[in-house]
Amino acid sequence: MDKIVIEGGERLEGVVHVSGAKNATLPVMAATLLAPGVYQLTNAPSLVDVRTMGKMLGVLGAEVEHHDHSITINTANCCTHEAPYELVKQMRASIFVLGPLLARHGKARVSLPGGCAWGPRPVDFHIRAMQDLGARVELEHGYIVAECDRLRGNTVHFDTPSVGATENTMMAASVADGTTIIENAAREPEIGAVGDFLRSMGAVIEGDGTDRITIHGVDELHAADAAIIPDRIEAGTFMVAAAITGGDVLLTGVRKEHCSAVIMKLKETGAVITEEELGLRVQGPVWAQAVNVTTAPYPGFPTDMQAQFMALMSVADGSSVITDTIYADRFAHVPELNRLGANINVDRNVAVVTGVKSLSGAKVMATDLRASAALILAGLVAEGWTKVSRVYHIDRGYESIEKKLAALGAKIERVRE
Ligand code: EPU
């Protein structure tokens, strides 16, 4: 298993290009199941999760070719409707195939994803939405077994905004009979990306990006191409890398409007963030000020940036309170940051971070994707060597993070064992 080894203390400087968004690529890939044809996705990130979704489409009968940063998907001969446990357990986002399979085949058998590193993460909203659209759904032997003659438009209301359930419903409702209204819909930029892609396939959707989305079902969709939007979480992670090292980094390929909450919080810490012709420039403070952060659905501060921001707060001037309102238990990085000398106490979904003057390098273990990013960020400023093991987590969602950081001047390398 690979390790990432970092010698802390380098100030990051230079230009980094932000890759395509994982969380836009995955639902867009699933949407190709809705209509037979050949699809070309560009600006797709080269990530383990993207390849896992490629394998899933392959099992469902699609031909998938990954080139550098593009993916060609041919869904002409998709006739299977079963998403097996072996793939779903590797990646929860496999649930995205539920809506498209039901819409195309009138039946779907999709393994339940099970728990994840930071808690149960249920899929009840996805199931209820399919039922609202007229599907009969049973849970059998760990599988969601769903059937319908043809999906029917309806009002679908989510108790809390769910990114994945909103996307699944948009996909399924695009070819349902009649109109579907999603109330309390998620508003993340990735919802807009899925909406844009479905529209280019012939869907009639309004309101994506707001909490009320209207989908007028059409008889059929057709194949289309998509250019994947930039990854706002990867961008945020590099912004924190600049901030934590007191560096000066220009991010290219980023959409500033997708990162507003993170930019605002980083500015409060003392970072200077300016829009330049070529991208977004982040100049880190000499010593970051502690600020409080509460995660919330978009446009609030993203839960996917909570761990990375905590790494910054662990060396900030003062104490900060970090509250995760999306996932009550997403704090697996805390004991590992504390091994590096951070002073963080967690009570339920609230972490109190008392900033320390310096961290000291140690062997730490990545527990999930964003936790791994937080440990790497902490390693950039820890005295001496930090060795992060189980880096397969990071490969799920960051493309060559060690190469990108090394190009900015970090002393970091991947060691194969
Ligand atoms: N929820 C339910 N039932 C459901 C679905 C969600 O109770 O059926 C709850 C969740 O437990 C959570 C809240 O609703 O408390 C929001 O979860 P959401 O459904 O929005 O999460 P998701 O769609 O499963 C996506 C991202 C996650 C990101 C969350 C929140 C993808 C592939 N994943 O997950 O990304 O944390 O939205 O923004 O889009 C990551 O990239 O590291 C990652 C975990």
Image (spheres, rainbow, N blue to C red):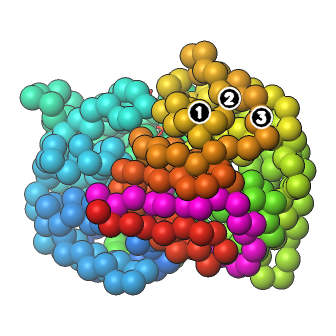
Instruction: Indicate the quadrant containing the C terminus: top left, top right, bottom left or bottom right.
Output: bottom left
Query: In the image, what residue occupies the spot 86% across and 38% down?
Result: 317
Please give the residue where the numbered disc 3 appears in the rendered image.
355
**Is residue 145 visible in this depiction of the protein?**
yes
Q: Is residue 372 above or below residue 333?
A: below
- Nearer-the-camera pick, 341 or 68: 341
Would you identify the image quadrant in which residue 126 lies? top left
Distance in Å between CA atoms under marks 1 and 2: 6 Å
Query: In the image, what residue occupies the spot 43% across and 31% down?
Result: 118
Would you identify the image quadrant in which residue 19 lies? bottom right
Please give the residue where the numbered disc 1 appears in the rendered image.
338
Q: Amino acid at mark 3?
A: Gly
- Nearer-the-camera pick, 289 or 75: 289
- Nearer-the-camera pick, 174 or 7: 7
Q: Is residue 274 left or right of residue 95?
A: right
Report crowding for label 2: few under 14, some 14 to 19, many 20 or more residues within 10 A (C-alpha).
Answer: many
Residue 21 within the magenta-colored segment of the rendering: yes
Q: Amino acid at mark 1?
A: Asn
Q: Earlier in the sequence, mark 3 or mark 1?
A: 1
Residues under numbered marks 3 and 2 in contact, where contact means CB atoms less than 8 Å apart: yes
Please give the residue where the numbered disc 2 appears in the rendered image.
343
